[in-house]
Image (tube, rainbow, N blue to C red):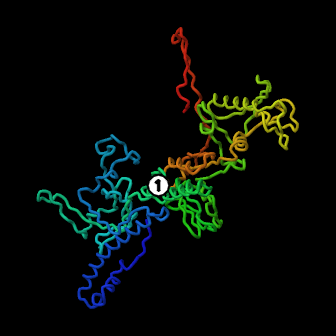
């Protein structure tokens, strides 16, 4: 909801309007009250024209474009017969205490008695600040979010009290064939917001992005434009884009000082001396009161971006999965490199004549076997007739994986098990040797997404910001929402890992085998 200041101009002041007409009309004319009402009405129309012009000018800038079109005054016509005939009045599956099909009174998707009063809202109405019964000298006022709400997704406006119960509202009869069949009232909506999809129709369409009309959608579109116009996204632009998609704000300015970090009735609130940030209840603050922030600092644990350029792996990164975008063709599924030590398996009697090593990886067993076999054969192909060159630490720069892991200062001959480390961390090995120059990871806590997040499918548009050689890993933490068990209960939590379904095997019986034999074909290269 936009901020409204009264008066914004002389068009909002009836006294100023009379002064413009002259001193006679402002002080001498006997019918000043009638003239004041007339000029106020004319000025309201002029103010709307001025507002439309300002919106048009602002729409030329992707930074200033308004989210909604605003009508200063909008007539809302309601009919008495149409109360509580909307989808908001239907029984829902997730309603507590209901057993469907238990009788004719409780049937799914049928109208139910509610403690609110719902009407169909005008098309594209997204919200409103107030509702009055008259533009001038109203007898009552309704406050948005308190006395009524607008359900823009379903085009419904819901009141806490039935407007038709208010005797001060003027009613108009509805005639059908000279017979009164209904009655209607006209309420006046102040500062009504209408969703005309300004952001999409002006800018987002050019990027192929269909975003909701929200501040987060506008911020996301601007972040994508910033990256494209600059020829590639900086770290700050990328973080701004991800933050907008997830509605997990980052700090806006340098020098902000955290003053509040606590839960309230709407979720987690973090307030600094300059801005207020809101997050989901399941997000946890990673800043403390008194901490001085820099622009772009992370405030909660719902989003963590990890750059792998130093070859280091934090404990918060549990694993990375290499899919078909990183591996060669003909792999059935992902290869998962986990962040913990695993035993290094050594075969000094491999048929190739070179020491063969591998270590446990999660994934399709045939893919894991092929990965290490291909790694071993490529290493053999790099071995020159003369001994491989060594760097200053004595480690070989080329050769098989066993050669690279060889700990001998002067390696001669093939390494044995005693010459190699007993364990290895698969993820640290991958990051240190493969991903450190061109990849990063983003850990997203799904339960901590903001109320106005754009949908995780919009993450795909961030690919437009990254150069072709850059790799992006997205890890979605699907942990459930927080739950507190009260009372004296003996509760023990057991955590297990599921790394993928075991491959299925089937036997071909003898009666299915013909004289021509059995032909086996690959139907699909994806295992799910």
Q: Quadrant for residue 65, please give it.
A: bottom left
Left or right relative to 35: residue 509: right
| Residue for badge 1 | 204
Residue 289 appears at what percent x and percent y?
63, 65
Q: Residue at x 28, y 71 (%)?
A: 134
Residue 384 appears at what percent x and percent y?
80, 31
Residue 420 appears at what percent x and percent y?
81, 35
Classify mark 1: residues with Cα within 10 Å, few (<14), some (14-19) or many (20+): many
Left or right relative to 318: residue 198: left
SS for tag 1? helix
> Residue 10 or 100: which is nearer the viewer?
10
> Residue 288 or 59: which is nearer the viewer?
59
Q: Residue at x 77, y 30 (%)?
A: 346
**Vertical comparison of 25 with 172: above or below:** below
Q: How many marks?
A: 1
Q: Residue at x 71, y 32 (%)?
A: 375
**Residue positioned most to the top:** 515
Q: Residue at x 41, y 62 (%)?
A: 68
Q: Quadrant of the N terminus?
A: bottom left
**Vertical comparison of 158 with 256: above or below:** above
Q: Quadrant of the C terminus?
A: top right
Q: Is residue 265 visible?
A: yes
Residue 93 appears at what percent x and percent y?
39, 45
Left or right relative to 95: residue 173: left
> Residue 227 or 424: which is nearer the viewer?
227
Q: Is residue 496 visible?
A: no
**Vertical comparison of 22 with 317: above or below:** below
């Amino acid at each position: 909801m936009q901020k409204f200041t009264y008066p914004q101009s002389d068009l909002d002041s009836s006294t100023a309007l009379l002064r413009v007409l002259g001193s006679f009309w402002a002080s001498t004319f006997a019918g000043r009250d009638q003239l004041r009402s007339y000029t106020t009405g004319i000025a309201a129309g002029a103010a709307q024209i001025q507002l439309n012009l300002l919106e048009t000018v602002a729409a030329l800038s992707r930074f200033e474009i308004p989210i909604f079109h605003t009508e200063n005054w909008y007539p809302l016509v309601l009919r008495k017969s149409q109360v509580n005939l909307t989808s908001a009045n239907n029984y829902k599956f997730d309603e507590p205490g209901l057993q469907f099909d238990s009788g004719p009174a409780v049937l799914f998707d049928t109208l139910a008695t509610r403690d609110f009063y719902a009407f169909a809202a005008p098309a594209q109405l997204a919200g409103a600040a107030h509702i009055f019964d008259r533009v001038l000298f109203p007898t009552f006022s309704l406050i948005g979010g308190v006395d009524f709400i607008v359900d823009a997704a379903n085009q419904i406006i819901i009141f806490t009290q039935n407007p038709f119960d208010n005797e001060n509202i003027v009613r108009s009869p509805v005639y059908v064939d000279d017979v009164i069949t209904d009655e209607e009232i006209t309420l006046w909506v102040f500062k009504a917001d209408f969703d005309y999809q300004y952001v999409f129709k002006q800018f987002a369409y050019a990027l192929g992005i269909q975003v909701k009309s929200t501040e987060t959608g506008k911020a996301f579109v601007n972040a994508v434009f910033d990256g494209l116009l600059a020829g590639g996204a900086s770290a700050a632009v990328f973080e701004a884009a991800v933050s907008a998609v997830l509605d997990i704000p980052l700090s806006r300015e340098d020098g902000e000082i955290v003053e509040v970090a606590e839960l309230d009735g709407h979720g987690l609130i973090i307030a600094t001396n300059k801005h207020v940030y809101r997050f989901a209840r399941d997000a946890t603050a990673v800043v403390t009161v008194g901490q001085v922030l820099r622009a772009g600092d992370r405030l909660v644990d719902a989003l963590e971006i990890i750059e792998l350029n130093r070859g280091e792996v934090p404990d918060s990164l549990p694993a990375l999965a290499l899919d078909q975008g990183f591996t060669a063709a003909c792999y059935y599924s992902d290869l998962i490199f986990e962040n913990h030590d695993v035993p290094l398996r050594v075969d000094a009697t491999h048929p190739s004549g070179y020491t063969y090593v591998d270590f446990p990886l999660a994934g399709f067993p045939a893919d894991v076997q092929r990965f290490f076999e291909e790694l071993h054969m490529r290493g053999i192909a790099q071995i020159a007739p003369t001994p491989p060159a060594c760097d200053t630490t004595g480690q070989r720069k080329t050769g098989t994986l066993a050669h690279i892991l060889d700990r001998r200062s002067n390696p001669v001959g093939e390494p044995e098990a005693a010459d190699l480390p007993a364990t290895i961390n698969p993820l640290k090995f991958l990051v240190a040797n493969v991903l450190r120059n061109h990849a990063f990871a983003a850990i997203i806590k799904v339960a901590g997404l903001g109320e106005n997040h754009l949908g995780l499918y919009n993450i795909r548009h961030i690919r437009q910001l990254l150069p072709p050689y850059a790799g992006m890993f997205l890890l979605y933490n699907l942990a459930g929402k927080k739950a507190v068990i009260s009372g004296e209960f003996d509760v023990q939590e057991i955590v297990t890992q599921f790394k993928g379904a075991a491959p299925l095997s089937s036997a071909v019986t003898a009666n299915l085998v013909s004289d021509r034999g059995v032909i086996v074909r690959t139907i699909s290269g994806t295992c799910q």
